[in-house]
Amino acid sequence: MSLGALSNLSLELRATDAPRDEQLARVEIALLGVIFVTAALLNSALLLLLLRRRRERLTRMRLFVLHLCVADLTVAFFQVCPQLVWDITDRFVGPDPVCRLVKYLQVVGMFASAYMIVAMTADRYRAVCDPMARLRRSGRARCSAPVGAAWCVALAGGLPQIFIFSRVQVAPGVFDCWAEFTEPWGLRAYVTWTALAVFVVPVGAVLACQVRICRAVRASVEARCGEVQGQTRAPGLSRARVKTVRMSVVIVVAYVACWAPFFTVQLWSVWDSEAPTESAMFTILMLLASLNSCANPCIYLLFSGELPKPRLCSRHKEKKCSVSEEATILSSVYLSLKSFSDCR
């Protein structure tokens, strides 16, 4: 399912050439335009930054962020942009193969973004709960498998779109890119399956990993408290590793906050025959889901400290500005959660 798919569901319910709400359409076009430009610029800038850093040292976390950035660019150019053009023209303009390709790529971006977050969280889980794994395999080897698996799931997950959507006649002389189902329950099954595959399953896997990670972090904090009190020394977790865990948590929270309303609206629209599918609320919730592609690069830049800070460096000693980011730069989220790691 995609942004275009939900708007098409509302159109599919009328399946006529009835005029659309032009005022609401202008709001859709404006929001999609802002989201597309913002997501494209932020993720392109971050991708260039990461590729430039690759010559120096591409850490495991940066590799995951790089692929998440590519996934978000896929969402921007192959999901948001086609839907923007679609809203401008009102009907899909293009032959049947283009219709199927657009629908396929729209879902590939959603799958890639969701399962790249799963892969990144799983990597943080291994780094925190199985730190000895770094002695058995190199960092790049550990990253390549989950990253490749995430892209394979994305490419395979979008295949049903090719067979479900096609260019069909929705009214006399009016053609559009529609989903056709032979059974009346087909639409419900399709939307429910998409919600489970793209949202419920990834979020469930991520939450399971995060619970284990939080337990490990708490155990590390207690170990450090014992060390301060003169007990047996424990290695604990490095500040850099805890910071990357917190960054992954914020990325997951942003994903849930953006996509939970979208899938709620999706399921409501197909399971409740009286759902207000033509209302502005449905449309706005559908569009705001793609804000997740704008949020991810901002979260990484906030946590990594790679935003330009000329004034900060001029006010402090040169030595402080040259210290490694992995050990010194703390985000505002870390400050707000500092009480979690204080020893009382």
Image (cartoon, rainbow, N blue to C red):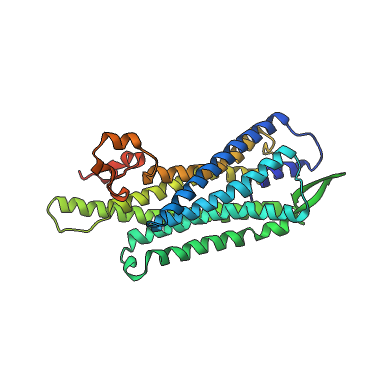
- The reply, left or right, for residue 32 in relation to residue 119 is right
Residue occupying the far bottom of the picture: 136
Return the x and y of residue 112 as percentages of the image width and height: 55, 55
Tally of numbered tags: 0
Q: Find residue 161 and report its image quarter.
A: bottom right
Q: Judge whether 157 appears above or below 4 on screen.
A: below
Q: Position of residue 26 (x, y in %)?
A: 68, 31
Q: In terms of image quadrants, where is residue 162?
A: bottom right
Seen at 66% across and 35% down, the residue is 29
Identified at 71% across, 44% down, the residue is 8
Q: Is residue 200 visible?
A: no
Q: Quadrant of the C terminus?
A: top left
Q: Position of residue 277 (x, y in %)?
A: 68, 38
Instruction: Kindly identify the residue that appears in the image at 59 percent across and 46 percent down.
Output: 76
Out of 310 and 109, give the one closest to the viewer: 310
The picture places residue 272, in percent across and down from the top left corner, at 67, 43
- On screen, residue 268 versus residue 14, left or right, reads left
Q: Is residue 218 visible?
A: yes
209, 297: nearer the viewer = 297
Please, which residue is most extreme toward the right here?
Answer: 172
For the residue pair 224 and 239, the one nearer the viewer reads as 239
Q: With respect to residue 224, does 330 lie above or below?
A: above
User: As drawn, which residue projects farthest toward the top?
Assistant: 23
